Image (cartoon, rainbow, N blue to C red):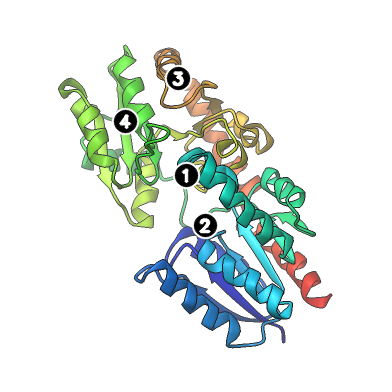
Amino acid sequence: MSKVLCVNTGGKGSLDSLRARYLASKLNADITHHDLNRGISKLAASREIWEVISSNKWDLIYQEGSGIAGGINLIRAAKSWGQRYIISTGDPIGGFFRVTKGEQIGNLMEIYERTLYKNCTAFLGWTPYLTGAAIKLGAKRAITIEGGADFSLFQSKSAEERLSLRQKYGIAADHLVCGVVGSLQWNNKQSYSYGYELIEALKLVKRTDITVLIVGDGNARERLQALVPDELRSRVIFTGRLLPIQVVDAMNMMNIGFVTQTLDELGSFRLTTKLPEYLACGVPVAMSPIPGFYDYGVVYAGWALPAYHPASREFHTRCAMWLDNLQSQDVEDKAKIAPTIAKRYFDYDAIGDRFATFVHEILKS
């Protein structure tokens, strides 16, 4: 039986870890998992990965995530003894760093990206846009394996359950709840964090029956809380970090889930894992008009957000105008469609079968 090492650069318990384990469970192979140790320095974690890679004769190594601590070792192993490896990622590496850290760091990371892809056996893109970009950067074989959702966990709850959950947070039953789930990390270059756009839009909304629900934690939380005027504090709820089962509850309190991306070489390539989770919970989404909004049927279960940067005044103004005119029937109609869209495009059973077929072909070659 083939020996496959699965390296997860997101760390134990991360979404990358869950995805790697679900996909690998479909393989007819002897599987070993290694999660990046985030409790030690990056250098020490990288050395630890190297020890695992060089400790056995692996028929294939599958790395979930493009982290350099694992990637550098994969490149080294490929050049040293021809180790075969697969890279799976949901981000354009060079684009991510150019947008978040600047041109110089972005260009350096694109060199790493090209080297990682040129030496890989195959590439798994979370979107077809990433898959195409990887082929252009040197990947010889590639396939799109979207980020899926655990449909046994992420499900729509009854109207009574949703009402009960709202009562715990003091949210009025008749309010339109606009929410976002994500890491609240402030990006100085972008002057932005998830949740910022919702607070700024709420300041401009005329109707008084809208509540904003911000789920997550990070260094931007205090900054965001300070942006909320006293008169709106009862209508902006911060939950802090939640367990996965609690995230399901939080999503079920929402009427609309926001999936905001920048329209650049980072945001336009991505599909956040929160997208299928919102949809699976029967929550229609307001999403930036990136290609995935149209290609994955979200247009039928949501609304295109304004084509402006989410930190801009124009974005906030147009969001407020849309929300002021939004009809409850439109929200209800799209909510009914949402779970169907989630199952059609993001069912891990179907995605996992494609992954297994692709990897088994590689193992036979």
List x then y, in percent, for residue 320: 39, 16
The Cα–Cα distance between marks 4 and 2, rounded to whole angstroms, is 25 Å
Disc nearest the viewer among 1 and 3: 3
Which of labels 4 and 3 is toward the front?
3
Mark 2 against mark 3, which lies toward the viewer? 3
Q: Quadrant of the N terminus?
A: bottom right
Label 2: few (<14), some or many (≥20) within 10 Å?
Answer: some
- Residue type of the residue flagged with mark 1: Cys
Reply above or below: 331 against 114. above
Looking at the rendering, which quadrant does residue 54 occupy? bottom right
Q: Which residue is drawn at 76% across and 65% down?
A: 358
The quarter holding residue 14 reads bottom left
Q: Disc 4 versus disc 3: distance between alpha carbons?
A: 17 Å
Give the percent coordinates (x, y) of residue 33.
Answer: 54, 76
Q: Which of marks 1 and 4 is in front?
A: 4
The residue wearing badge 1 is: 281
Q: What residue type is labelled 2?
A: Asp
Q: Mark 2 points at which residue?
A: 150
Q: Earlier in the sequence, mark 4 or mark 2?
A: 2
Point out the tag, 1 or 3, that comes first from the N-terminus.
1
Q: Earlier in the sequence, mark 4 or mark 3?
A: 4
Could you give the CA–CA distance between mark 2 and mark 1, rounded to whole angstroms? 11 Å
Q: Are marks 2 and 1 in contact (CB under 8 Å)?
A: no
Work out how far the residue at label 2 is from the one at label 3, CA to CA, in angstroms. 32 Å
Amino acid tagged 3: Phe
First in sequence: mark 2 vs mark 3: 2
Tag 4: amino acid: Val
